[in-house]
Amino acid sequence: MRKIIEIAVSPGQAAGEKSIRAAVARSLGIQQDELSHVRLIKRSVDSRSRRVLIRLRLEAVLHEDGPYETAIRKSYLNVAGKTRVVIAGAGPAGLFAALRMIELGLKPVILERGKDVHNRKTDIALLNRKQLVDPDSNYCFGEGGAGTFSDGKLYTRSNKRGDAGRIMDTLVYHGADPDIRVDAHPHIGSDKLPAIVENIRNTILQSGGEIHFGSRVSRLVIREGRLKAFADQNGNLTEGKAFILATGHSARDIPSLFLENDLPLEFKPFALGVRVEHPQSLIDSIQYHSKTRNPFLPAASYSLVHQASGRGVFSFCMCPGGIIVPSATEDGQVVVNGMSNSRRNSPFANSGIVVTIDAADLKKYSSHGVLKGLKFQEEIEKISYLAGGSCQRAPAQRLTDFIREKISDGLPDTSYHPGITNYPVHQLFPGFITQRLQEAFLAFDRKMKGFLTSEAVVLAAESRTSSPVRIPRDPQTMAYIAIENLYPCGEGAGYAGGIVSSAMDGEAVAEAIAGKLL
């Protein structure tokens, strides 16, 4: 007999298998020896009251003998001589598209502008220590995509594009902690993701797929309305029967490539703002209603949203126990992002706080057409670079001074390694952004008393939340509306927002291609 039950226990009880079994038995009114197995399905922290609880959803197996199957099984075919599908980009959309194609019997050939994950680490170290930006190998570009070195958060609100559980299972199969299958807000950590990405690469190669690093798509070879090949920066052509474009939200050369070929694009609303950093102990005390955090509780996080003058302002990529990292992809720009390692043990908590931006907000940039959002992003990043005083230093201001519109008298410590420069950040953005941020911060303090504090610092600019351009595709075939064998995919094409949704989109595109070619 099997039963699905939900229980609420203390953090200490949730940390022990024996105490969970005891709680399950009590809930069912049975003796513990009547339980054959207990499987955790979902785990979440409930801090709505002063007594913080862990809510568990479990499957209880009663009176069944024999082993309880928990292993994840995958079957990847040998596709060495099969039909070739070329993928631009080795981020989550591209990698999961490749894995799904192998399962379906197609051969993926991946072109990645950046380096493999091992050599990418060296370039990221140079960016952090010496502020040297490699335009093809950084926090945004390289094997694994932008998520590899910026946290690996796996939370998604929707299964509309596919099965999120499948994505989790695939990650676990390639080395992720099985806890990601049950946590309400699963997270891998930038210290563990590189090994998982490398395991995915090995699966693709061992199955007969190909991956070519240092291959940036620079030209589309189109004949008679079909794509024949991707050409890289050296003129090398890679041909296939179908092509997936999964280049990520920071590949700004791709929209220009489309316009050069008179191919249609669309403006897409996006979000832009600042990254806010608090002491983690302060966020813990607010969320857990205690001066000290229970050792069985994770570093506390938050999710905030406010409507300010017709625009949403919301927290983005919140990193408890994390650090702020430089995510520029070119010299002359400052972009900040957040990440955490698996233990989330930094003394800081940071989050993007961003304002949604629509076409109506960008009339000044109307001459740039569908690229107006991209041009606005670029301008804010260049202004941030100049305000920081170059060398990837970020302009920064105490949160309370951002509200009061005054220059800070000194700045608190920060996790941002290149350093910060005291600057009136409230003057850096157009008024419609600054005013909405100010209104939202006041509202957030009403929701989380103590959020608005001089101990918190804002850094600019948090500008790479998503792509401001969409590559339109047919909702039925998932193919680009102007080229029937080209498939825009993931964040860069405007169809996802995060690792899991990008991976699901990659799988969906792979299935659409297989349905046409096989």
Image: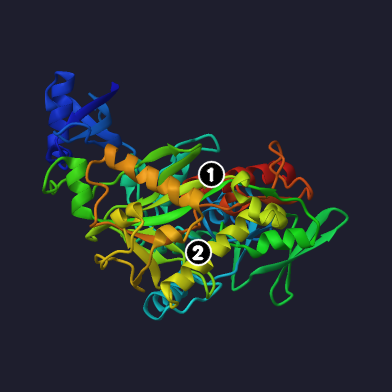
Q: Is residue 298 visible?
A: no
Crowdedness near tag 2: few (<14), some (14–19) or many (≥20) residues, C-alpha within 10 Å: many
Residue nearer the viewer, 404 or 132: 404
Whole-percent x and y of residue 85?
68, 56
- Residue in the image at 18% along x and 41% along y: 288
Sequence-wise, the earlier of marks 2 and 1 is 2
Residue picked out by circle 2? 140
Q: Amino acid at mark 2?
A: Cys
- Residue in the image at 52% along x and 76% along y: 134
- Residue in the image at 73% along x and 47% along y: 480
* Disc assigned to residue 504: 1
- Residue in the image at 35% along x and 55% along y: 402
Q: CA distance from mark 2 to mark 1?
A: 20 Å
Q: Secondary structure at mark 1?
A: helix
Q: Amino acid at mark 1?
A: Met
**Rendered image quadrant of residue 129:** bottom left
Q: In the image, is residue 11 above or below residue 90? A: above
Whole-percent x and y of residue 13?
13, 37
Q: Is residue 111 visible?
A: yes
Apparent side of residue 496 relative to residue 320 in the rendered image (left or right): right
Assign the C terminus to one quadrant of the image: top right
Whole-percent x and y of residue 299?
23, 50
Apparent side of residue 310 relative to residue 108 in the rendered image (left or right): left
